[in-house]
Every structure is written in structure tokens, then in C-alpha cells.
Amino acid sequence: MALSLEDIAFLRSERGAQCLAACADSDLSESNALPLLTGLRQTLSMTEAAAVLTTLKLRKKALAKFPQFAHDMLFTQAGLQQASHRLARSYRAGLIEPRAVLDVCCGIGGDSLALAAAGKRVLGLDLDPVRVAIARHNAAAMGLGAEFRVADAARPLPNGYSCIFFDPGRRDRQGRRLHHVERYQPPLSLLRLWKAEEIIVKLSPAVDLRQLEAYGGQVEFISTKGQLTEALLWQQRPSALPRATLLLDNGAHHLSRDTHAAVDIAAPAAWLFEPDPAILRAGLAQTLARQLNANLIDESIAYLTMEERAETPWGRYWKILDWMPFQLKRLRRYLVERGVGHITVKKRGFAMSPEALITRLRLRDGAEARVLAMTRHQGKPIAIVCEPV
């Protein structure tokens, strides 16, 4: 259900707030949706009941992004989907130096409120009156002083703001992803009309870097606890080389490209290392390999291998037990002889799907478990047998 301004007014009313509070601990499973809706209809109109049920479901989904305040906030499905992870919001707010920030396409207000919590003077702009009404409610729920206004980003922006944060929509009205920055809603080309000390754009982490060449600045790929969540274009940063950032509860880790020679290609050694996805998107596998005293297994595959394990937050280790050129019968015989009946398949640069490989290996009786990393070494397919986790 898409919320209207009338729905927002009801949800913010005393009657709506009481109903949301009374149903806060309800069973929201699909099997209980009809009984819950029927119960709500005893005192509410159909539209009011649907708004309450929608909000309860969105608040539950929002706990991961807004753990402290989700139970008092309002959301739309699209607005919640586009909202940044709490660690990313906090990270950006701490980096932005100017005190006055214009949040263009502010959505439900998540980034604006993180900036306000960091002591910035914030004005959030959005074309959708419903999202602006929700952002105002969320500011009140969090006790923050950010302001919000309905405005078209394609028109001249308000003066007096030294930083612009721009978060354009990356899905169309049917919810399909938009892959070109000039098809974002609104398009990235609006940047050319703006002037500020600092302009920061939130982008899809899958953005094609070639689409950004005309805009200058630096692209930062952000991983939140190992999940690639977003990319940022810092238009005023001088470096044109991408950087990777990993956000953890204990702080942020950064890696930028060095200028050293390429690392060697080597056969699998004692350890297999899978780099964080931000490393891969920023093209920093070789830089990380040098830091870890590691080698690449193949020049086109971002698996690393090394004899000694080095502590790093930038990925995951697997203990290598053996490896071999891939040949299905040989691999099956090897696993059966060692009593392996349970496998987890990882793949990079390997044609067969994990499901197809598991089916064709026909491992049924063994009690042992292994991880198989199916990849390439010097252009040829190999199987790396690792300890299970």
C-alpha cells in the first residue's frame, strides 16, 4: 500500500498513534495478516487499517537501519529501501565539514537526520510531499531540528548551504533498477548547475565508472560489515582513483591504490583469501595482496593465496587442504575417498553453477564436510578444497 498525505495525518494523530502502539507486538506474518486486518477494521476504516498494517510491517523491516527509533518512525517501502545503513549515515555525517548542508532528494530523511545529529544545519528537499511529511515526522520522533521542504531539484536550489548531499532515485516507478546515472531520477547531470564547497552524491555500488569520468572527483565504494551497500562521488576530492571503505561497529577502514608493481600469480598455498566486495569494486585486489604478502591465483580472478595468515578486516580466510585441476570424476573420487558428503561451493570465473556441480558430484553417504572454491589458475579451471567453517 502506498501511503497518502491523509494516511500520514491519521498515523500522526492521537488515534493513529494509539492504534500503532496497541498493535506494536502483533504477529505480522502473512498467515496472520487477515485476522489482524479484521481486528483493526472493528474500529478503523479500511484505509486506516491498511495504513496501520503497512506501517507496522515497515517498522519491523526498518529495525536494521534505524534500531533506536524505528518503532516511532514512518516509512514508505521505496524510502526505506533507499535509506542508508546506520553506519554509512553516521560515517558520512562525521566526514562532512561544512556546517550547513542541503540534502537534495532527502526521501524519508534518514541522511538529513544523521547530519543534524552531528551538529549540522540541514535542509532536506524532495519532490514528493508524502516523503517530506514523513521526514518531518521522523525528525520530531528523533528530537532533531532538520527542516524539510517540497522542492524540485531541477529548479534553482536555496542559497546559504556550503555542502550539497545528493541522493537521486535509482529505481523507476515500477521499482526496476536504473543503471545509467543520467537516467537516475533526477539525473546526475544536475550537478553541473550547482556550486558548493563540497558536493557528495550517493550512487549505486554497481555504477559504471566510465559514466562518472566527466564529473571528476573520487569514487568511494562502501562496504558495511562485508556487504557492498553504496558508492559515493566526492566531487571536490582531487584523486581520480577509487578507494574502498569498510564500515564496522568499531570504526572505518580505508584502502587506496598504491603505485607498486603487480603481484605475482601463484598456485594455491596454505590459505585462500576472499577480499571484501568494496576492494573488488575499487580495483584494489593487488594493493591488498601486497599488504598481506599474498599472490593472485589468476590474473583475472580476485582470489588471493598466501603461506602465512595476516590479520586484516578486509575479507575472509579459508584453510586450503588441497587443490587440483578440475575434472569432475577426479574431484568426485577424491571427495568420496575422504568420506565427504556435504559441500559448500564458492565460485569465481567457473562456468558451472554451484547447484549443478553439487548435483553432478552425487555425494550422498559421507559424513565429512568441505568447502570447494571453484575458480581458475593461469586461465584453467581448478578446484580448491578447504576446511569447512
Image: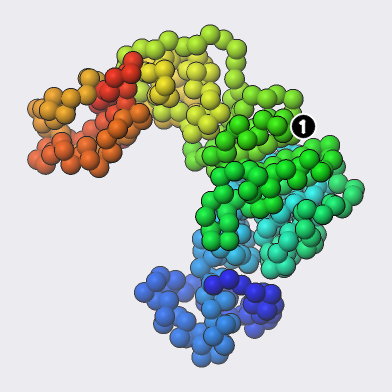
**SS label for mark 1:** loop
Q: Which residue carries the number 1 mark?
A: 236
Most foreground residue, 343 or 173: 173
Q: Is residue 137 above or below residue 382?
A: below
Indicate the position of residue 383 as horizontal and vertical percent values: 25, 25
Find residue 365 and report its image quarter: top left
Indicate the position of residue 210 as horizontal and vertical percent values: 61, 31
Most foreground residue, 216 or 3: 216
Most foreground residue, 263 or 111: 263
Q: Is residue 182 above or below residue 339?
A: below
Q: Is residue 90 visible?
A: no
Name, please, the residue furthest toward the bottom.
Answer: 42
Most foreground residue, 184 or 342: 184
The quadrant in which the N terminus is found is: bottom right
Indicate the position of residue 157 as horizontal and vertical percent values: 84, 51
Q: Is residue 100 visible?
A: yes
**17 with respect to 308 (left or right):** right
The quadrant in which the C terminus is found is: top left
- Residue type indicated by callout 1: Gln
**313 with respect to 220 (left or right):** left
Find residue 144 and report its image quarter: bottom right
